[in-house]
Image (cartoon, rainbow, N blue to C red):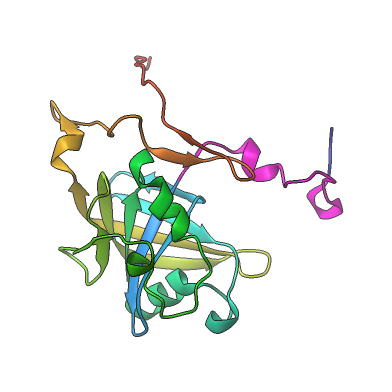
């Protein structure tokens, strides 16, 4: 099969995000004048070591937020956000926070998630997350297409749950971290193996 994206693919689900998988999930927590927000983004990744930097992309909009969604609207307002890493145990509350709730609805409360305060930024985080990255906005890049924005940020603080550190190495709780695939499919990180780089 070959298709040009502008012509459509003719399949039940867009294969693009299934081809680029598994994708880590950035569970983005923000706070703005309307309150707290928590939402998962699967166009998310680390992009640099020193200083540590991350990115995520917001690719749709809500009528009550103009050209974007609650997360990006809050980041535009405050310049900060927290990326929470999603374990398999947090899959149900993470999924619950993917709802397109009205602006001002607190997804922490909606999904019954305990929040904790960040250290370097004025933002909540998911207390039970295996790790959380406190982030300060570097830039927002407008991408081609409607409502597509790339958010780049510097990590200013890192939380790691004590039980996820073993001999000084971050070790996710079994069965692993959640990752996004295509359609409605998710997976968990599998058994790690080591390879020495040449």
- At 60% from the left and 38% from the top, the residue drawn is 20
Q: Is residue 25 above or below residue 166?
A: below
- At 47% from the left and 53% from the top, the residue drawn is 95
> Which residues are drawn in magenta?
4-24
**Residue 78: x percent and y percent?**
33, 77
**Residue 84: x percent and y percent?**
32, 53
Front position in the image: 42 or 141: 42
Front position in the image: 184 or 76: 184
Count of numbered tags: 0
Left or right: where 94 falls relative to 118: right
- Residue 26 visible at all: no
Q: Is residue 62 above or below residue 133?
A: below
- Residue 29 visible at all: yes
Q: Is residue 61 above or below residue 178?
A: below
Q: In the rendered view of the protein, which quadrant contains the N terminus?
A: top right
Instruction: Indicate yes or no whether the magenta region holds residue 18.
Output: yes
Q: In the rendered view of the protein, which quadrant contains the C terminus?
A: top left
- At 45% from the left and 58% from the top, the residue drawn is 96
Left or right: where 71 falls relative to 163: right
Q: Is residue 129 above or below residue 72?
A: above
Instruction: Indicate yes or no whether the magenta region holds residue 143.
Output: no
**Residue 132: x percent and y percent?**
26, 52
**Residue 27: x percent and y percent?**
39, 55
- At 63% from the left and 44% from the top, the residue drawn is 17
Image quarter of residue 193: top left
């Amino acid at each position: 099969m070959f298709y040009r994206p502008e012509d459509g693919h003719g399949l039940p689900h867009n294969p693009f995000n299934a081809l680029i998988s598994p994708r880590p999930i950035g569970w983005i927590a923000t706070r703005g004048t309307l309150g707290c927000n928590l939402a998962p983004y699967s166009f998310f990744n680390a992009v640099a070591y020193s200083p540590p930097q991350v990115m995520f992309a917001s690719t749709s909009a809500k009528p009550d937020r103009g050209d974007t969604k609650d997360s990006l609207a809050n980041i535009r307002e405050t310049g900060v956000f927290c990326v929470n890493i999603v374990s398999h145990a947090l899959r149900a509350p993470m999924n619950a926070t993917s709802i397109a709730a009205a602006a001002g609805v607190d997804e922490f409360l909606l999904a019954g998630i305990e929040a904790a305060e960040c250290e370097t930024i004025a933002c909540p985080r998911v207390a039970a997350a295996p790790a959380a990255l406190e982030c300060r906005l570097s830039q927002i890049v407008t991408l081609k297409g409607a409502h597509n924005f790339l958010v780049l940020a510097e990590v200013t603080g890192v939380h790691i749950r004590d039980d996820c550190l073993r001999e000084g190495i971050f070790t996710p709780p079994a069965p692993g971290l959640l990752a996004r695939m295509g359609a409605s499919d998710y997976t968990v990180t599998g058994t790690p193996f080591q390879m020495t780089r040449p």
